[in-house]
Image (cartoon, helix red, strand yellow):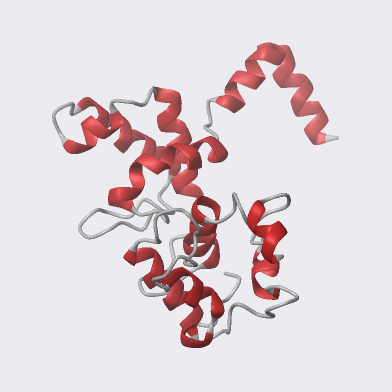
Amino acid sequence: MMKTTLLILLTALFGVNGIATAVEDEGSIQRGQAKAFYCTGCHGYNGMGVGAAPPLAGQDKADLLAKLKAFKQKKSSLMGLQLARFEENDLKDLAAYFSSLKSTPPGQASYERDIEPIIQWRCITCHSAGGEGARKSGLDLSSYQALMEGTKEDGELIVPGSPETSSFMVMVTRKDHLRMPFGAPPLADDEIRVLRTWIEQGAKNN
């Protein structure tokens, strides 16, 4: 009842288009995830920063948006050059995405923050419903549960606590033509490292 009353009030004040615009102005996590590709070189695919680059994951959305806008004005700086391609709505999307990520303690790997983005960017095209990899191997990586189930033929691919005996690690680190992702560049060292750490820490759905 309260939600209905609020919607009627907002419609009276702003109209339907005004409400849609207000929601749109908040930024989109989904669009932000796609645009974050340009940020991963310094801030990591999980938003936790690489080297001296600061972490963005879990920051307050409004504060992060203000920082992005300020850096965009510094046109000769590295950040200014990177952000030059983005309009204000793009910055809102980036702020929405990075603020939505978990900021876990240093050294603690997270499936949602660390592992799922790797799978989404490097594996899911083939290993999801209808994908070539899923058809040929039966391996579906579209969810944590599917990853942990493995395949009917090979069984579990992840052995919690033991990356050395986890077939998934073998597949992404092998040096021959069967290395995964198949026909694509290998996983980066930091991606391999966080996968190994996550498995060592129990491969939790965290």
Please name the residue shown 40% across and 42% down the image.
37
Q: On screen, 45 above or below 202? A: above
Classify the position of the C terminus by image quarter: bottom right
Please name the residue shown 43% across and 28% down the image.
90
Nearest the camera: 123 or 80? 123
Q: On screen, 58 above or below 199? A: above
Pinpoint residue 122: horizontal percent, then vertical percent: 49, 54
Please name the residue shown 35% across and 71% down the image.
106
In the image, 175: left or right of 147? Answer: left
Residue at the front extreme, as displayed: 177
Pinpoint residue 3: horizontal percent, then vertical percent: 78, 34
In the image, 205: left or right of 74? Answer: right
Pinpoint residue 9: horizontal percent, then vertical percent: 74, 20
In the image, 144: left or right of 3? Answer: left
Please name the residue shown 48% across and 58% down the image.
118
- Callout count: 0
Classify the position of the N terminus by image quarter: top right
Q: On screen, 121 above or below 91? A: below
Nearest the camera: 179 or 32? 179
